[in-house]
Amino acid sequence: MNINNLHIGSLGFFFAVCICGMLGCREVQSSKTEPIQTKPSEPVQIDLPEIKARGKLKAITTYSSTSYFIYKGQPMGFEYELLLDLAEYLNLDLEFVLVENLDELTQMLNKGDGDLIAFGLTITQPRKELVSFTKHYTTTQQVLVQRLPENWHRLKYHHIESMLIRNQIDLIGKPVYVRKNTSYYERLINLSNEIGGDIDIIPVPGNTETEDLIKKVSLGDIDYTIADQHVAQINQSFYKNLDVKTPVSFPQRIAWAVRKTSPELLKSVNAWITQFKRKPHFNIVYKKYFKNRSAYYRRVQSPFYSKNGGNISQYDDLIKQYANDLNWDWRLLASMIYQESRFNPEAISWMGARGLMQVMPETAELFGYTASLERPETNLKAGITYIKFLKRLWKNIPDSTERQKFILASYNVGQGHVMDARRLARKHGKNPDIWTDNVEIFILAKSESAFYNDPIVKHGYCRGQEPYDYVRDILERYELYKKVLLRDA
């Protein structure tokens, strides 16, 4: 399967968050103002049969601390993990379409940029006019995110409580930052009507994440925002000076969405949700991202958490140096090293391969490297020298992207088996210069006697699934790295 986010709920009301500080603007919304809904273009006519014919499900999601991110080189996230399971259920490859401006979710879906909004959307009547919601997978309520008093840790509980907003009426005249095209914004409008006074609703740009606003409250840049309870609570584990106990909505349903022109896709996704929610894995994944506060705290503090910058390992500078020497994108080399060792310089395979690039001692010696392969720089030099050898070996593969696949496969399983697979591809009418859907078929076939006993095969049996998966996994992770890591970072 090729790979290229869901939010969660007691009594209260609904609230939302956004900021316009960078624009230097504030807009007060009265209770008579209707929330702006983005008028969608006519949805494209793409449903499950067309998606099946394409072979790939395009999932629109967002880059955030819970939906999708990179941590120590590993793509992670609630939506990320659920989408992997959904794609497997549908027997489709998976492409992640990361949205920068959350106001564009509906437009992107209806234009056909993606097939599914895999992001925790609150089901509301205005939204139901624009999209078809899947079955809800959880419920939540929206809460007010506010800052504790500066000396809160020295105060008694009742003193702290007296300084916080606990009655929604006290929001009259208070500045609350939210994105406009959100259920938070809608709820604030309705709440203003219910309490008979205007809340100072301050819109923020569509590319402002809820967690960014939560951080701004903690830093004192803004005073109030709204978040779904589970998101607010997990962020509170890092921002200790926040209070998230005041509800502003009733319990609401959270779901994904598809186009109104995709009823078959909707039916299949709903069947998957019903099935998946019965599995223990759903609760495991949910707790992993929304309940495990210590793990969240470690991630967001780590220098190798992608939202803290462009680093994924302590060896990034070395990787960039040697990738430049290869004329490769460093993110591709990083994905390969992650596949080999998870960036562990002391890793040793069952066959004796060692270090970051899992170099065999015999191969290292062949290229003149006799020092300890646990030394990161020595290991990288040996691995890169081997890759250079493979680049020369496969220089006649015309397409540079396909050439990289032959290099990766050869690094994993040896060039002899790859040459056998090319000969088999040629014999069976496939293109020996194309890896994808051509030579890769026959690297798989070399585990079957009818193929490895063919007279044109010189290197016998091969566990073909390993190099087949190896190439695909590296390239899939590389595509994910490209979405969140800068090439020249």
Image (cartoon, rainbow, N blue to C red):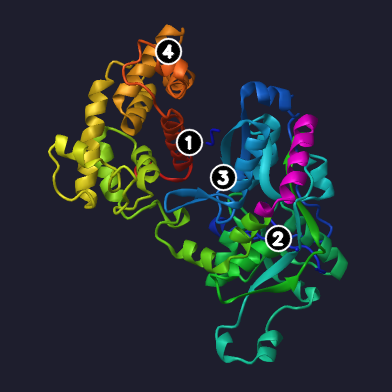
Q: Which residue is mark 3?
A: 100
Which-is-in-front pick, marks 4 and 2? 4
User: Which mark identifies residue 16?
Assistant: 2
Q: Which range of residues does the magenta coloring cover? A: 260-282
Q: Where does residue 21 sit, x and y in percent of width and height? A: 56, 60
CA neighbours of label 2 inside 10 A, class few (<14), some (14 to 19), many (20+): many
Q: Earlier in the sequence, mark 1 or mark 4?
A: 4
Identified at 28% across, 38% down, the residue is 323
CA neighbours of label 4 inside 10 A, class few (<14), some (14 to 19), many (20+): many
Identified at 40% across, 51% down, the residue is 310
Say what amino acid the circle numbered 1 marks.
Answer: Glu
Q: Which residue is mark 4?
A: 425
Does the magenta run of residues contain 280? yes
Helix, strand or loop status at disc 4? helix
User: Based on the displayed image, in which of its 4 quarters is residue 209 positioned?
Assistant: bottom right
Q: Are marks 4 and 2 in contact (CB under 8 Å)?
A: no
CA neighbours of label 1 inside 10 A, class few (<14), some (14 to 19), many (20+): some
Image side of residue 195 versus residue 61, left or right = right
Say what amino acid the circle numbered 4 marks.
Answer: Ala
Say what amino acid the circle numbered 2 marks.
Answer: Ala
Helix, strand or loop status at disc 3? loop
Q: Earlier in the sequence, mark 4 or mark 2?
A: 2
Quarter containing the N terminus: top right
Q: Earlier in the sequence, mark 1 or mark 3?
A: 3
Say what amino acid the circle numbered 3 marks.
Answer: Glu
Q: Where does residue 376 sit, x and y in percent of width and height? A: 24, 51
CA neighbours of label 3 inside 10 A, class few (<14), some (14 to 19), many (20+): some
